[in-house]
Image: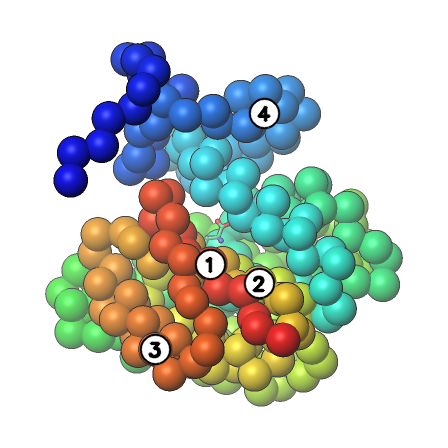
Amino acid sequence: MLVRNALPQPRVWAYDADGMATNHFSPFTADPQFTALYDEMAARWFADEVVDARWRMWLLTRWARHARSVPGAFAEFGTYRGGCAWMVLSTAELGPERRFYLFDTFAGIPHENLTEAERASEFGGRLADTSVEYVAQLLAPWGDIPQLVPGDVFATTESAPAGPLAFAHIDLNAAAPTEHVLRHVYDRLSPGGVIVFDDYGWTGYEDQRARIDAFVASRPEELVALPTGQAVLLRSP
Ligand SMILES: C[S@@+](CC[C@H](N)C(=O)[O-])C[C@H]1O[C@@H](n2cnc3c(N)ncnc32)[C@H](O)[C@@H]1O
């Protein structure tokens, strides 16, 4: 079916980065406070480049703000140098009673539990240029809200507080730990709670997508894939 827009569309992209281009309204372009925060974060996020992932970061932070009305803690699985966590904390204004658990080895992707394709692409050992000390210092302005949980998620999820979750960001870049974390999170997610998957639609992460799809297929929720490569699941009541 051929669908035409009634109005002529501009030929200039409002956003053209991070694997997508759009000429639709991109709300962060009209939000100088978000832009300033993003620029501050991006300048120290990766050691060798400044990346423009504003659409992903905008959606992540909007879902985090949305989840403030849901009871439970926030959690991120895959924190690296704390860029997403810093943006969530800077924009979501979490109350002092809320906890934001941050799971990572803080020493790179473990070589264990990778799929054949992930091993062939040499995922193991990537993203090691971080540390508990670096992220703890970065997030120190938020006091006790951020709680770092260092170690392999296969070892740390069960030892972490088991209370309800309102919001989870899963950004582990590997299939087996993503599936492990998804099982852990789903059972604890409050009704209306949000899971944001960072890697879902990205080329090279097909093994991860297959495991997420297989998990969600037998659940009542619908996984919503986004043009940013992210996907979102909202927990049914
Ligand atoms: C793409 S990075 C996360 C990016 C992060 N959200 C940010 O804001 O920059 C993926 C992270 O997942 C972590 N990771 C991957 N597999 C893990 C595992 N089995 N246990 C703990 N951390 C893991 C890596 O150490 C890495 O820091």
Q: Give the number of the mark in front: 2 or 4.
A: 2
Question: Left of 92 or right of it: where is 7?
Answer: left
Residues at discs 4 and 1 in contact (Cβ within 8 Å):
no
Question: Left of 164 or right of it: where is 218?
Answer: left
Residues at discs 2 and 1 in contact (Cβ within 8 Å):
yes
Disc 4 C-beta below 8 A from ligand 1: no
Q: Which residue is mark 2?
A: 194
Q: Secondary structure at mark 4?
A: helix
Of marks 2 and 4, which one's residue comes earlier in the chain?
Answer: 4
Of marks 2 and 1, which one's residue comes earlier in the chain?
Answer: 2
Q: Give the number of the mark in front: 2 or 3.
A: 3
Q: Which residue is mark 4?
A: 35
- The type of residue carrying mark 4 is Thr
Front in this rendered view, residue 174 or 13 = 13
Q: Which quadrant contains ligand 1?
A: bottom left
Residue at 29 percent across and 66 percent down: it is 209
- The type of residue carrying mark 1 is Val
Where, by quadrant of the figure, is residue 83 drawn?
top right
Image quarter where the C terminus lies is: bottom right
Q: Is residue 213 above or below residue 171?
A: below
Q: Which residue is mark 1?
A: 232
The residues bearing labels 3 and 1 have C-alpha atoms spaced at a distance of: 14 Å
Residue at 43 percent across and 51 percent down: it is 129
The residues bearing labels 4 and 3 have C-alpha atoms spaced at a distance of: 37 Å
Residue at 31 percent across and 71 percent down: it is 213
Q: Which residue is mark 3?
A: 217
Residue 218: image location, x then y, percent: 37, 83
Question: Left of 57 or right of it: where is 15?
Answer: left
Q: Secondary structure at mark 3?
A: helix
Of marks 4 and 3, which one's residue comes earlier in the chain?
Answer: 4
Q: Dot 2, how many residues are within 10 Å of its Cα: few (below 14), some (14-19), or many (20+)?
A: many
Q: Secondary structure at mark 1?
A: strand
